[in-house]
Each structure stands twice: as structure tokens, then as C-alpha cells.
Image (cartoon, rainbow, N blue to C red):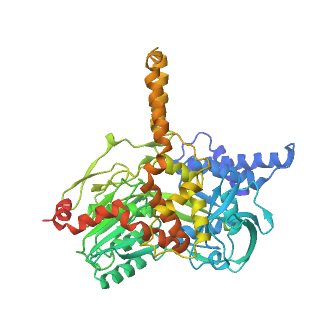
């Protein structure tokens, strides 16, 4: 505190002296820190009620960082497990996902295989009533998740209500070091095409992909699908390590530019490639971000693989974890990254000097770049696939069934009633199971509004505004009745879509996360497209302009 006041006094004594930008910023920091401390002291001394200085400071910090970008985040000492999970994919806990269940309850949504939750007998669908004797009433999923995490070796007691058995159960569970897998599944899709599902880029991701790749090669793989869909990224260096499997030593994969020289780096492949010729298709979607976009972008810019799917998220910013005092830390945006062609994939401008608000960078400002083989690519806020697949639309009825937890509840009841099912790749929801599901939801609420109903509502309002409705009302009512009849039949109309989703939700109860992936492989349209491209070498070469 003393050195801050000294700095302020020195600057004030300098009068109107013109200071360099860095010194001006230092003065602004010192001045405003002094003001903030003064306000906090006055509040603590004179505010009508007792205050919590820690909570007020946390609010101030969160508000300050929120004005920058969503990736610059402060972590308190109590959130150390969150920081650990970002970098290593590890945390101290029981190995279970939870979700909001209705308005006021939280339930176990998924159990990780071979983790404390599974070993103790917890099941998906268990509604959490108490954690260490404290009621969860009024708590959200974030609060309860924090309470369930802790140092490995410590014990947490959960009291849950199990709807499938209509009973309350108690579990004393010893926390362990939970490691989320970078690769939840890999395997052969047919005699020649291998498949690797990569979910994150934490420590050892590159090593794990390399080992999976080598294993698939021993099984006869001559072409690969690398699935980066829904992969939000992680460590930049692991993206470089993964590219080094496919790209020869010395290639630039990514480079960064920041405000200070120390943040400017060029990342090249450090070693000889494991296989620089095997055909590769990389799958991406709108949730593929950061390190996923570095890998997909490098494959595209170096013409090393074909990108299939949907346009990626568009995150071209790099963060570092910075340690702070009292065991707290901050994830801090330090630079932008650029892929081999020179383009940045950042979609939203957070740092514009011309505006105080963030904004999406318009396509009209997109700049053209060239890949290694001369193909034109653009910096349009994400990686645009070489082969785009149709958008995955979910019907209104399925959305409502999911949102109201009816599919979740049915899968839990099915699991309670059936000790086993066929293997994940063989299990399907047949007519008997589907009919049981229809009966299950018969008297349950899953009201929803279709797009057609929205259009009908707009039509009625427009017709009334133009004084046409009285004349068209008989036709309108006729359409309305027909629409009601069609909506009543929606379960049957969208039977296949509902059955596919039900199958994956049931499979995960028996075979965990790996089972859900395996169950959906044969019906996944993006994977089907990828296989078609890999089995047609002329098409593959044509896309990449390989002569």
C-alpha cells in the first residue's frame, strides 16, 4: 500500500509532465487501486449492514474481466481443481456428471467407468438430496459440483433419491484423481478406415493420439478419420504434437502474436513424421474450437487432409494460466494465433479500439489466403470445411422430450428393468421398446411449438392487420386442425430420430461414454461422408489438388 501511495505522490508532483503510455497505465492502476481500497474500507467501516469484503472483491474482479473477453477468468484458491482440469484433464472427485433436473433438483446424468461413483453403486438418474449432510435445496448444479469435488483420498457423503426404486440411498465415497480421457474411443470402422475420437487437448494428448494411431496401423488401417467435433481445445503444444504424426519435421503449424515480445512464438513440428502419406479426414463442427481449429486449420493449409463437417467455432486467442497470490490464479488471454497460411480464425473482435463492444467480424472483411497447393481459403471466423455436411436439425418433439427429461427417465427405468443389452454396436431400439416409450410418455407433459405453428401465428397477425382474416378464417381453421392431427402423430413421424437418440442414451447406461460413441458410429452422417471420401482416392486427391 505504501509504494502505491508513493507512486501517486511522485506522479502528482510531476504536474503536467507527459508520461509514456506504460507509465500512464501504471499511474492509472495505482490511482484506481487506491480508490478501490478506500471504498472497500469505507464500506466495511460505515455501511449499514455487515459486508463480505471477499465477496465484494470477487464481484469487482469478475465484472472487470467480463469487460474483456470470455476466456480471461479469475480462479480463487477454492477453484484449484478447475485450473488443474484445464491443463491436465484431472480433478479430485467421484467421476460423475450432474445436470439440472426440473426447476429445483440436480441429478446424476452420467457415470464414468471405473471411477468412485460407479464402484460405489451410484446410477444415472439418482437425484442428489444432500452432500455431506447439507441439503441441496436451492442449489444449482455448479454449487453441487463444487461440493462434490475435493482432494483425492477425502470422503464425500451423498444422499440420493432413486426414482426407479422409489427409495432414498446414502453413499460414502472416497474421492480419487479423476482423469478425463483425451481419447474416449478409437477403433476400426471397416477393414481399412481407422477412427480416433479426440475430446480435448490436455497433457499427453499428442502421445495418446500417436499410440492410438500406431495401434490402428497394426490392425490394418490405411486411412484415418480424426474426429474433433465438440472438442473445445486445450494446450496449443499438444496440437503441434498431434500434427507431427502426419507432417514432416520443420513445418510451421501455428504462430502467436501478442502485445509483448515474449508472447510471439513460432511452433514447428520438432521431429520426423510418423506417417506423412496416409489419407486423413478431420471432422469438425460449430463446437470445435481453439486447439481443434489449429489442427484442422493446419491439415487444411498444408493440404494434408480433408476437412468435413460444419464451420468451426472461431476462437483464435491463446490463454496462459498465471499464478497469483494466496494460491489463486488467472486464465489470461495473451495473444492471437495464426495457422500456416497466415490467417487467424478469431470470429469475434473483443479488442477493437473503435468500439467498446465486442462484435462478430463480418464476412465482407474476410481476406483470402492460399494453402500449400494453391487452394483459396478465408479468415471467416473459423475453419470452413472442404466438404460441408447438412446441419443437424433436431425435431421439435425430440427437443421437448429431451428438455423435459422423458428420454433420460425412460433410459434410467429401462436400465433398472434390464440387467444387460446387446453390445453397443449391435444395440438398437426396436418396435417393442419404442412402443414402451410411447406408453411411458402418454400422460406426460412435453408441449412444444413447431415452426409451422409460429408461422401460422404470424400469418394470423398479418391477416388481421390487413383486414383479411375474416375472409380466410375458414381455411385457416382447417389448416389449424390438420396441423393438430399431424402434431399428434409426431412421435411416429420422427420415430427413427427418437429411436436413435434413445439407443445412445440407453447404451451409455451399460457401456458408459465409449458405448454412446460406438452405438452412433454406423448412423453418423458425417462419418459416412468421411468414409466415402477416403474410399474414393480420386475424389480425395481432387479436393486437395494433389496431382
Q: Considering the image in quadrants, where does the C terminus appear?
A: bottom left
Q: Position of residue 39 (x, y in %)?
A: 76, 45
Q: Answer with the quarter of the image where residue 241 lies.
A: bottom left
Q: Nearer the viewer, residue 77 or 527?
A: 527
The residue positioned farthest toward the left in the image shown:
547
| Spot occupied by residue 456 in the image (x, y as percentages of width and height) | 46, 30
Residue 451 x/y as whole percent: 46, 38
Can I make out residue 241 in this image?
A: yes
Please indicate whether residue 125 sits to the left or right of residue 401 in the image: right
In the image, residue 35 sits, relative to residue 522, either above or below, namely above
Question: Which residue does the image show at 62% across and 50% down from the upper left?
Answer: 444
Quadrant where the image shows the N terminus: bottom right
Residue 358, image x and y in percent? 49, 43
Q: Is residue 304 left or right of residue 105?
A: left
Q: Is residue 110 above or below residue 270?
A: above
**Above or below for 24 versus 533:** above
The answer to which of 269 and 219 lies nearer the viewer is 219
**Residue at the spot x=86%, y=44% of the render?**
46
Q: In the picture provided, is 13 more to the left or to the right than 391?
A: right
State the residue in front, 57 or 398: 398
**Can residue 350 be seen by looking at this rendering?**
no
Quarter-of-image position of residue 238: bottom left
Quick one: which residue is furthest to the top in this view? 467
Q: Is residue 364 above or below residue 225?
A: above
Q: Which residue sits furthest bottom?
A: 218
Amino acid at each position: 500500500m505504501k509504494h502505491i501511495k508513493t507512486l501517486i505522490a511522485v506522479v502528482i508532483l510531476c504536474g503536467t509532465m507527459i508520461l509514456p503510455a506504460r507509465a500512464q497505465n501504471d499511474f492509472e492502476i495505482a490511482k484506481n487501486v487506491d480508490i478501490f481500497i478506500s471504498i472497500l474500507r469505507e464500506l466495511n467501516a460505515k455501511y449499514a449492514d455487515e459486508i463480505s469484503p471477499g465477496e465484494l472483491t470477487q464481484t469487482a474482479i469478475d465484472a472487470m474481466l467480463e469487460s474483456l473477453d470470455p476466456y480471461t477468468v479469475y480462479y480463487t484458491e477454492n477453484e484449484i481443481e478447475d485450473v488443474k482440469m484445464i491443463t491436465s484433464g484431472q480433478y479430485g472427485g467421484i467421476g460423475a456428471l450432474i445436470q439440472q433436473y426440473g426447476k429445483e433438483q440436480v441429478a446424476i446424468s452420467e457415470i464414468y467407468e471405473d471411477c468412485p461413483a460407479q464402484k460405489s453403486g451410484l446410477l444415472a438418474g439418482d437425484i442428489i438430496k444432500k452432500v455431506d449432510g447439507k441439503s441441496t435445496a436451492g442449489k444449482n448444479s455448479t454449487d453441487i459440483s463444487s461440493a462434490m469435488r475435493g482432494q483425492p483420498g477425502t470422503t464425500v457423503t451423498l444422499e440420493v433419491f432413486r426414482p426407479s426404486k422409489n427409495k432414498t440411498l446414502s453413499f460414502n465415497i472416497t474421492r480419487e484423481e479423476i482423469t478425463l480421457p483425451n481419447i474416449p474411443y478409437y477403433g476400426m470402422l471397416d477393414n481399412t478406415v481407422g477412427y480416433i475420437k479426440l475430446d480435448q487437448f490436455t497433457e499427453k494428448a499428442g502421445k495418446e493420439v500417436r499410440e492410438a494411431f500406431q495401434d490402428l496401423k497394426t490392425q490394418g488401417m490405411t486411412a484415418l478419420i480424426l474426429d474433433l467435433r465438440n472438442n473445445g481445445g486445450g494446450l496449443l503444444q499438444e496440437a503441434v504434437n498431434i500434427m507431427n504424426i502426419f507432417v514432416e519435421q520443420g513445418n510451421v503449424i501455428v504462430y502467436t502474436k501478442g502485445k509483448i515480445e515474449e508472447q510471439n512464438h513460432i511452433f514447428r513440428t520438432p521431429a520426423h513424421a510418423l506417417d506423412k502419406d496416409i489419407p486423413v479426414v478431420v471432422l469438425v463442427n460449430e463446437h470445435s474450437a481453439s486447439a481443434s481449429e489449429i489442427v484442422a486449420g493446419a491439415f487444411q493449409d498444408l493440404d494434408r487432409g480433408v476437412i468435413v463437417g460444419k464451420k468451426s467455432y472461431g476462437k483464435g486467442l491463446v490463454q496462459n494460466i498465471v499464478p497469483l497470490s494466496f494460491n489463486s490464479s488467472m486464465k489470461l488471454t495473451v495473444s492471437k494465433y495464426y495457422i500456416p497460411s497466415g490467417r487467424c480464425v478469431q470470429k469475434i473482435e473483443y479488442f477493437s479500439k473503435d468500439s467498446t463492444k465486442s462484435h462478430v467480424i463480418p464476412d465482407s472483411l474476410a481476406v483470402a489466403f492460399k494453402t500449400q497447393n494453391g487452394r483459396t481459403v478465408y479468415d471467416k471466423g473459423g475453419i470452413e470445411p472442404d466438404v460441408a455436411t447438412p446441419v443437424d436439425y433436431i425435431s421439435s418433439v425430440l427437443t421437448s422430450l429431451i428438455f423435459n427429461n422423458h428420454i433420460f427417465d425412460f433410459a434410467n427405468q429401462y436400465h433398472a428393468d434390464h440387467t444387460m443389452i446387446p453390445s453397443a454396436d449391435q444395440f438398437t431400439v426396436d418396435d417393442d421398446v419404442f412402443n414402451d416409450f410411447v406408453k411411458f410418455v402418454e400422460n406426460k407433459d412435453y408441449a412444444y411449438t413447431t415452426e409451422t405453428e409460429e408461422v401460422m401465428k404470424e400469418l394470423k397477425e398479418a391477416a388481421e392487420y390487413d383486414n383479411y382474416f375474416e375472409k380466410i378464417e375458414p381455411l385457416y381453421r382447417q389448416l389449424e386442425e390438420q396441423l393438430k392431427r399431424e402434431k399428434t402423430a409426431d412421435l411416429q413421424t420422427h420415430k427413427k430420430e427418437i429411436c436413435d437418440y434413445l439407443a445412445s442414451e440407453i447404451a451409455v447406461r451399460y457401456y458408459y461414454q465409449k458405448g454412446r460413441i460406438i452405438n452412433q458410429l454406423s448412423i453418423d452422417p458425417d462419418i459416412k461422408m468421411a468414409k466415402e471420401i477416403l474410399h474414393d482416392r480420386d475424389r480425395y486427391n481432387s479436393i486437395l489438388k494433389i496431382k
